Amino acid sequence: MGQNLLDVNDSTFESEILNADKPALVDFWAPWCGPCKAIAPVFEELQGLYGDKILFARCNVDQSPNTPTKYGIRAIPTLILFKDGKVFDQLVGAVPKSQIEEFAKKAL
Amino acid sequence: MSDDLFDVAIIGCGPAGLQAAIHACGKKAKVVVFGKSERSSLYKAHVANFCCFEEVVPGRVLLESGKFQAEKLGAVFVPQDVVDTKNENEQFTLVSENNETFLAKTLVLALGVSRKKLKVKGEKEFLGRGVSYCVDCDAGFYRDAQVVIVGNESAAVTGALTLLGFASKVFLVCKELSVSDALHQKLEKSGVTVMEGTWVKEILGDAGVDKVALTNGQDLSASGIFIELGAKGAMELAANLGVAFDAETFSFIETNKKQETNIPGLYAAGDITGQPWQIAKAVGEGCVAGLEAAQRAKRLQT
């Protein structure tokens, strides 16, 4: 907790996520999305727990429309786990915390 | 009415909302209650475990007498769903399905829990690949696309109107519409294609949704389907106010013993705060929320 989440956008996505030196978990969200707001604290909490092994980042789909299109995102929140520059797994919706944690742990 | 400032606004007219209204009125607060009695989960229930009612009582009877009681004490009832909420400068703005605006110093969320899943083939498989439960979140992903929205109530109709601003064609699939006359007229004048008297049978596609099969045998070609059953729930109305949900399931609003949420002036009571889903719990929490909200409104006055 406390540590700010990395904000990524269309122009930084490749360098910061695809070329990251560790697995990256990206939360695709938007400011008007209620369920996105609901899971945000959990995402930050998980960063506190696993932030040394996984890169936690978020991408505002309103400001960066190209990246969500590229990954076929049609609902938010969507979490995508990237490993070695490729999509490893994807999780859609405001699902329970335990499920988000299980999902994040797939990166380990 | 729209320009009046209420002390306490209550969303939901089940046992929690009614009890909140009764106790807030008892504190001389100016109270407005939103919602439709027949949508309360109590409406069709038969109550046999509520203290002091030894005989089985139809839930509908309890709801009607509770409403009558609150009205006698001065509560104003607006038999409409709330479709939007805002919280600015210690004041809550609520928009009803007739597009009327109401202002209140405090807000009690007593809107219960409802079923959001359609339970048809393809729903789970295509989640996030054409199936969505939130028009406000996901409409932007369907620019110039054909979409289906399914539901009989205000969430589906307001959602269909929102989608018109993005999609090339919007089909509203409903068994029988149950919305206010004003919202119904707005829908009729809009470009939404209403398919009434049918329902979704199956969602079909390959990589994503391609079409939606209806129970009347028709197939609608669409790349997205929005499932918006009932009225807008807590996730849609309250999350935008910044309300904290329980982190385990994101289904319930977290409150303290005063029924306060993490947002000042915002209270929650009844099923929406978690189990047990019982009248006894709902009225208990409603009582506390109504008293606390009324007291806060009075404090803000001085």
Image: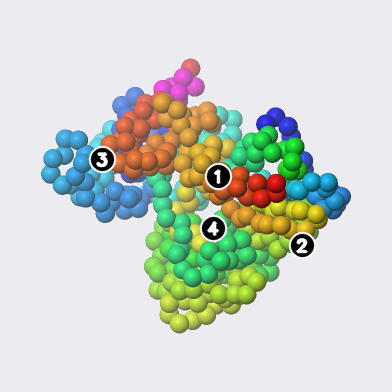
**Which of the two discs, 2 and 1, sits closer to the camera?**
1
Q: Which residues are magenta?
A: B295-301
Which badge, 4 or 3, is on the more N-terminal residue?
A: 3
Q: Counting other residues with Cα less than 10 Å from the Cα at mark 2, is it few (<14), some (14-19), or many (20 or more)?
A: few
**Front one among A51 and B284:** A51
Q: Residue at x 58, y 62 (%)?
A: B127
Q: Looking at the image, can residue A86 be seen?
A: yes
Does the residue at mark 3 contact the one at mark 2 (Cβ under 8 Å)?
Answer: no
Q: Which structural element holds mark 3?
A: helix
**Residue underneath mark 3:** B66
Q: Residue at x 41, y 65 (%)?
A: B177
**Which of the two discs, 2 and 4, sits closer to the camera?**
2
Q: Position of residue A97 (x, y in %)?
A: 56, 43
**Residue underneath mark 2:** A70
Q: Which structural element holds mark 4?
A: loop
Left-right relation of B112 to B105: left
Query: Which mark is on residue B133?
Result: 4
**Which of the two discs, 1 and 3, sits closer to the camera?**
1
Give the alpha-carbon distance from disc 4 to disc 1, as whole Å. Answer: 21 Å
The chain that hosts pointer 1 is A
Does the residue at mark 4 contact the one at mark 1 (Cβ under 8 Å)?
Answer: no
**Front one among B222 and B207:** B207
Query: Which mark is on residue A98?
Result: 1
